[in-house]
Amino acid sequence: MRCPICNHETADENNFCGYCGAKLIEYKKEKKNAPVDQEGQPAVEPKENPPAGEINLFADPEKQPDPPPAAQPAQPSFQNGAQTAPQSDYTFAFAPKKKSKFPVIAIIAVVLAAAVAALYFLGVFSSGPLVEIGKAAEKTARSKSFRMEIEMKAERQSLKMNGVTLIDPDARNIEIYMEASVADETVILLFKDNILLTDEAGYISVNDLSAYAEEFWKEYDSDQEKVDWSDFLELFGYGPDEVDYEEFDAAVETFLLNLNDADYINEKLGSYHKSKNSETTSHIFEIQTRNLSKELVNVFSDAFRLNDEEEKTDAEDDVYDMLKGVLGTGVELEFSVKNGYLTGFRLEYAKAAIKATFSDFGEAEIDKGVIEKYKSHLANRPSF
């Protein structure tokens, strides 16, 4: 069948489109019950599709133009040296017509954000995968400077970034220099004195981000031990009538505790193992989509007031359809630690692969020639 929103082919048994995330259950019911003529064809002429053109992710889904047909994407990989971008015209589009009772996107985003910010667990636990990774990330951030290289592959595109980050929390200062390459084009990004400068083949633009920096340091200085999820969830349209915020907070904590337990991961989610090569320790997670869907519903069901087994089963199917459309059958993550620093990160799933490396801790510097080249632009702080 074809998705009525993005016009991509999707499996008949799917309840969600694997390409745009549109909910297909109601559409399939309407299609099943639609009147037909004597030849078995729809009695009502289908609506014409809008003209082909660029997809606007933020536009009304009913007014979206049709993307070109998509091929099944290939799995990108960094494992064996040879790196080939998957051949696909996959297009991201978030266009579900109805709000699911179990907002998987919100939960996944919250859990990932919480996992990244899980350092407040360090005072409670002395060991476990998250604790070891968290300690390494904290040491990396406190090194005051490091070099980073990032490579991302998705669809037919490849992005490479390399540069230097300087961070001094005591001085409330962050500086970043980055060279980003896409195809044959290179863009220079420089963040200094709360000014973001971009240089695209000689076309230079500057933006004053002082207000954002001030807000960032306020959050950094706050003594808040737990996140207030209410504002975040309300962004997705889930208020107190639909979500029990206290239960949600407890569910996030429970899920993080589970992720810090290697036995739980191996039993419930997929697999986790730790390997050592010379001085580098690698933490490798292989998470199965079906298992993750089941556990998310299990942990967060009380927060979203899923009161009976039928609701839970429906939610699990919804979550699985949504995740499978993006992740495929699973996702693999690897964190590398050396001398107590986080030195590498790798993420691979059906439609994309990301690899990052970090080095020169405490020694990396932004080339003085770069600062000299752009100092006049940085001095002319834009006003609004």
Image (spheres, rainbow, N blue to C red):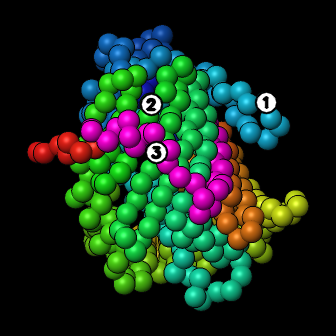
Q: Quadrant of residue 296?
A: bottom right
Q: Nearer the viewer, mark 3 or mark 2?
A: 3
Which amino acid type is shown beneath numbered disc 1? Answer: Ala
| Residue 204 spot, x, y in % from top left | 31, 30
Q: Is residue 381 left or right of residue 42?
A: left
Amino acid tagged 3: Lys
Residue placed most toward the observer, 118 or 311: 118
According to the picture, the residue beneath numbered tag 1 turns out to be 82
Q: Which residue is mark 2?
A: 187
Is 228 on the left-hand or right-hand side of 250? left
Disc 3 element: helix
- The local crowd at label 2, few if under 14, some if 14 to 19, many if 20 or more residues have their Cα within 10 Å, is some
Measured from the top left, where is residue 6 in percent x and y?
42, 27
In the rendering, which numbered label is found on residue 368? Answer: 3
Distance of label 1 from label 2 (alpha carbons): 25 Å
Q: Determine which of the numbered discs, if any, sits on residue 135 in the image.
A: none
The residue type indicated by label 2 comes to: Val
